């Protein structure tokens, strides 16, 4: 899940991570942007940088402000406070029809009275481009999105997946500096959505356009994005590459929002470059390596992904952490199974194991007494 | 059986209330006028059997229709009616579209109230509303008093008993029929389409011409037919608000029936009017049909 975007090649070779390059200047910069609708604060003092050629995902629950953020970039909303810079220029006074930014709408917003061809040509015609150039550009877009056969159809005569591609082609036709995608795959079924995610990445790489995608589907964000910004209540909680977001969340909120996680609350006891977590009366403390500093007795949350827990019938001889429990539930997902293991104190941990054997030969079943174990580097210690 | 019965109901309705009256009018239009009761001949006498029926048929002719082409009053009246109906339709569109647009753009909680205001005039008798326009438009009427009062004019305007008054009357009366279908089309319009148009480089105005107008086309066409069709045969408005110059076929029809008591010629006028009206009615139905298909 987290391996897609880490090795995105740059034109000059090397790894694409301009956000770590202090000399790189961002394509878009939000500076202390606040947006209020009456009493409601949709965006709260937000500062972010988005770099050229990035595939930037805004991820968060509905109502977190991600759509407002995008609509401000498109020009449909203006910030109450703060400035938005596009290539160093303040874009607040520029109306949407003059911005080098195009948007792909959640509903696609295809013009129902125009054919696929005319929909894609719509923006080009407004630019007053020569007819032959429009023809060439539309044909190029049709090829890119594999829609050549549907050029003459009206939007209601094609499938949902094709409509999605028309919307993408239409918004890319004007070769914008920045393309905004508002839940672009929300209306597609799961299989088509996964295919389309790779298509999107492919098209983003081919065209070299900067993409900002809004989504509430964390898997989608992880798959396509070079960086993911997790939002909640109008604020950015964490911005990082998908693997960093998953492996090294900065808060319990992010850890819980992205993927499945076990959270164990306890009191910290620092010990060198690690800490011991006293989590239950009469239980062995949990050991976790961390670079963060905790004071003795401070409340600490240990976040461990289920796939990092090992489940075994016998007590493991050498393990940094181990706990005994009883299998409460098994979620069989085909390739993997998730075991819900209840510890003596009542805490339920989730452990995932790959089903390398056929299910008839599975080693554990309901009510079995098992051991869970994990290394000291498996979990992340979080303050809050 | 039950389904056939259900389909039979509207057909029987049409047969009793449209087709049979039409055939009676058609028959009268083929007859000759007579000073009698009823004021035309021949009448069918069932007692004489088949021979009587053939005798009856042989007396029918197209004389009255030929007469309509000979006297230029009639085709002038038809043409003038078409012109007045067409211009009224255009005026109603120019007035009605902005109203429908404003209604569709209004806050959702206001829309039922605005809709109510458009329909409200129907609660008063049509005749009373047309009469009240006499009070407004006459030389001493409210409009002239107001304009004289604010000093825009020094002499009262002659509006009543001219074609201008007829246009005002028709536009006023049939405006709701223009507004409602356009409003229905505009209300369905998805705002994100306009945002998409702007995003792709349209100004507000060009987004209106390129997206809003084409997508409300079905409503515009429906509204135009709903105004044009009744306006073409309109009789009350031209006779109350119009003057001697106002020539409309509805008025001619009325005069043939009630002043001239020439039922056969009046019937011929009515039949021709119906034939003229069939064209827009068929076009209207086609438009409705096409819209239903497009909405799938």
Image (tube, coloured by chain):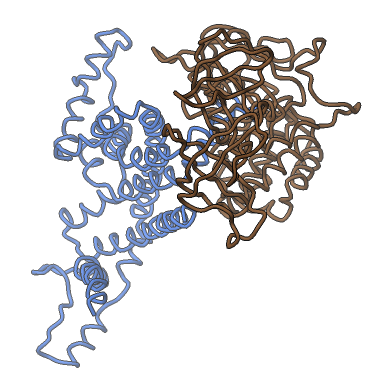
Residue A102 in view, yes or no = no
Q: Residue placed at 80% from the left, 10% from the top? A: A22
Q: Nearer the viewer, residue B270 or A330?
A: A330
The N terminus of chain A sits in image quarter: top right
Answer above or below: position of A372 versus A73: below
| Position of residue B193 measured from the top left corner of the image (x, y, whole percent) | 54, 35
Looking at the image, residue B201 sits to the left or right of residue B269; the answer is: right
The answer to which quarter of the image holds residue B99 is: top left
Q: Nearer the viewer, residue A97 or B127?
A: A97
Answer above or below: position of B9 versus B114: below
Answer above or below: position of A40 versus B218: above
Number of numbered tags placed on the structure image: 0
Q: Chain B rendered in what hue? A: blue
Note the chain letter of the brown one: A
Q: Nearer the viewer, residue A138 or A301?
A: A301
Q: Residue placed at 50% from the left, 16% from the top? A: A267
| Position of residue B232 measured from the top left corner of the image (x, y, whole percent) | 33, 49
Looking at the image, residue A326 sits to the left or right of residue A219; the answer is: left
Looking at the image, residue A336 sits to the left or right of residue B146; the answer is: right
Q: Residue furthest right?
A: A12
Residue A344 in view, yes or no = yes
The answer to which quarter of the image holds residue B271 is: bottom left
């Amino acid at each position: 899940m987290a391996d897609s975007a880490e090795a995105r090649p740059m034109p000059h070779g090397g790894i694409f991570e301009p956000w770590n390059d202090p000399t790189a200047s961002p394509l878009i910069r939000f500076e202390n942007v606040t947006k209020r609708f009456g009493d409601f604060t949709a965006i709260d003092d937000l500062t972010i940088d988005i770099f050229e050629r990035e595939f930037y995902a805004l991820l968060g629950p509905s109502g977190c402000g991600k759509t407002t953020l995008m609509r401000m970039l498109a020009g449909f909303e203006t910030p109450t406070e703060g400035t938005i810079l596009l290539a160093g220029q303040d874009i607040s006074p520029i109306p949407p029809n003059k911005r080098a930014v195009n948007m792909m709408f959640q509903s696609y917003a295809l013009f129902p009275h125009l054919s696929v061809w005319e929909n894609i040509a719509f923006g080009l015609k407004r630019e007053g481009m020569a007819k032959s150039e429009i023809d060439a550009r539309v044909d190029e877009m049709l090829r890119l999105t594999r829609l050549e056969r549907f050029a003459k159809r009206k939007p209601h005569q094609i499938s949902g997946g094709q409509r999605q591609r028309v919307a993408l082609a239409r918004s890319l036709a004007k070769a914008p500096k920045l393309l905004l995608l508002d839940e672009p795959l929300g209306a597609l079924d799961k299989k088509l959505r996964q295919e389309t995610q790779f298509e999107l990445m492919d098209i983003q790489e081919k065209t070299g356009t900067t993409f900002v995608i809004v989504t509430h589907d964390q898997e989608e964000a992880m798959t396509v994005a070079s960086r993911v910004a997790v939002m909640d209540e109008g604020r950015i909680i964490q911005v990082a590459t998908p693997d960093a977001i998953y492996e090294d969340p900065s808060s319990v909120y992010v850890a819980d929002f992205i993927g499945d996680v076990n959270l164990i609350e306890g009191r910290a006891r620092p010990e060198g470059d690690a800490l011991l977590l006293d989590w239950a009366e009469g239980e062995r403390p949990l050991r976790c390596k961390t670079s963060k500093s905790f004071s003795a007795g401070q409340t600490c949350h240990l976040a461990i992904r289920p796939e990092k827990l090992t489940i075994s019938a016998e007590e493991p001889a050498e393990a940094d952490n181990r706990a005994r429990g009883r299998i409460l539930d098994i979620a069989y997902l085909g390739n993997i199974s998730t075991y819900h293991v209840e510890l003596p104190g009542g805490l339920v941990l989730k452990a995932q194991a790959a089903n390398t054997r056929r299910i008839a030969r599975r080693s554990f079943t309901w009510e079995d007494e098992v051991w869970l174990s994990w290394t000291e580097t498996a979990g992340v210690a979080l303050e809050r | 059986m039950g389904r056939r019965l259900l389909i039979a109901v509207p057909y029987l309705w049409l047969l009793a209330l449209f087709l049979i009256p039409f055939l009676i009018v058609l028959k009268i239009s083929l007859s000759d006028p007579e000073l009698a009761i009823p004021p035309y001949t021949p009448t069918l006498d069932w007692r004489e059997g088949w021979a009587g029926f053939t005798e009856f048929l042989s007396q029918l002719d197209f004389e009255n229709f030929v007469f309509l082409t000979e006297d230029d009053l009639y085709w002038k009246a038809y043409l003038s009616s078409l012109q007045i109906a067409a211009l009224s339709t255009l005026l109603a569109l120019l007035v009605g579209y902005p109203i429908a647009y404003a209604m569709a753009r209004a806050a959702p909680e206001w829309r039922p109230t605005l809709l109510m205001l458009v329909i409200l005039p129907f609660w008063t008798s049509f005749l009373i509303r047309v009469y009240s326009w006499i009070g407004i438009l006459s030389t001493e009427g409210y409009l002239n008093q107001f304009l004289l009062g604010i000093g825009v004019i020094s002499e009262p305007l002659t509006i009543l008993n001219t074609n201008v008054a007829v246009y005002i009357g028709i536009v006023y009366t049939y405006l709701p029929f223009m507004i409602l279908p356009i409003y229905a089309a505009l209300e369905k319009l998805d705002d994100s389409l306009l945002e998409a148009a702007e995003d792709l480089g349209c100004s507000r105005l060009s987004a209106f011409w390129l997206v809003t107008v084409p997508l409300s086309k079905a409503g515009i066409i429906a509204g135009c037919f709903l105004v044009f069709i009744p306006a073409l045969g309109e009789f009350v408005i031209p006779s109350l608000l119009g003057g001697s110059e106002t020539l409309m076929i509805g008025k001619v029809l009325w005069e043939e029936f009630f002043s001239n008591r020439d039922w056969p010629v009046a019937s011929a006028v009515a039949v021709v009017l119906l034939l003229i009206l069939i064209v827009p009615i068929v076009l209207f139905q086609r438009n409705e049909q096409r819209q239903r298909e497009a909405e799938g």
